[in-house]
Image (cartoon, grey):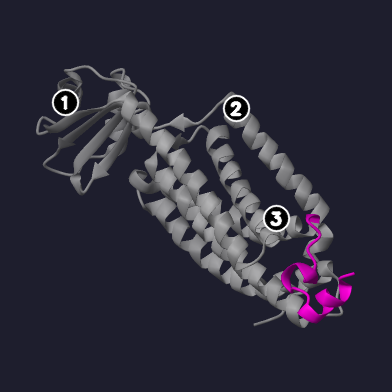
Amino acid sequence: MKQFSIPFMGMRKPVAGLSILLILISLASLAVKGLEFGLDFTGGTLVEVGYEQAPDLDNIRTLLATNGYEDTIVQTFGADTDIVVRMANLYTPTLGDEVLAVLQQEHADVTLLRSEYVGAQVGEELREQGGLGMLLALIIVMVYVALRFQFKFSVASVVALAHDVIITLGIFSIFGIEFDLTVLAALLAVIGYSLNDTIVVCDRIRENFRIMREIEPVDLINQSINQTLGRTLITSLTTIFVLLVLFLFGGEAINNFAFALLIGVLIGTYSSVFVAANLLMAQNITREDLIPKPKEEEEDELP
């Protein structure tokens, strides 16, 4: 594979400024606008209906909106003839029958399969557990990297992962994209994906510190990133191609999931190349941090 020679570390200050700016914008949006939580977190009603033939989902959305049911999510459930209508923050005992009556205006063959209410308390518990899950994942990653490499690598990896999650959440907040359990699952997958890329770069940096003795840390880190860049690009591009297909043709049921993964992979690739290495430089990583002094040298230094 071709060896790259891109001066990544020469761009570390502008890149650090960009990352800080993106994080500040994301945090500001999360504080002011928050996230557009879906039915899984807010509570609401899920209505499932059955058709004899596959209907047009856009027509169903338009029909519901014109009858006062706006901001609903309409998607297939298993078969093309089974349709699920999700309505956040909305519930009455007769809501299922009301939705059925609206849909029967165009298709008399529609039948009500189920109408369920998701309580707000359940949604709040899911939100808390999801947040704790992400926090626990970051803590476990920090402990693993500290044991596997060194504490400075641990800090760099966890901060880079937090950087990816915050910016992804910020994008969902800024554009008002619905945040549901599938997006939460995508964020946890992004943590794993980004960590994998970061570990590859860290492992090459550690290896080069052992074999490249007459070189400055900034040049060593730059060479390490270039050595792993081909692998990083191939992995990221193949993943992005698959996610693009899912996003464009996967349907509404996995649209937000695919979008969250797509954004997360792009940002995770960026952070693996720039952010983690930049943080190592900020902590003044040296060869001595990774290779302990021989015992004889330590004894000679004792008074």
Label 1 or label 2, whichever lies nearer to me, is 2
Of badges 1 and 3, nearer the viewer stands 3
Going from N to C along the chain, the mark reached first, 1 or 3, is 1
Q: For the point 69% across and 77% down, which residue is it?
A: 207
| Mark 2 secondary-structure assignment | helix
* Residue at position x 53%, y 38% in the image: 172
Residue 192 against residue 297 in the figure, above or below: above
Amino acid type, label 1: Leu
Q: CA distance from mark 1 to mark 2?
A: 38 Å
* Mark 2 Cα-neighbour bin, 10 Å: few <14, some 14–19, many ≥20: few
Indicate left or right for 55 with 265 as reference.
left
* Residue 97 rendering spot, x and y as whole percentages: 15, 22
- CA gap, disc 1 and disc 3: 52 Å
Q: Classify residue 102 by image quadrant.
A: top left
Q: Give me the residue at 35% from left, 30% from top.
A: 123
In which quarter of the view is residue 225 placed?
Answer: bottom right
Residue 155 location in percent, x, y? 67, 54
Q: Disc 3 and disc 2: Cα gap in Å? A: 24 Å
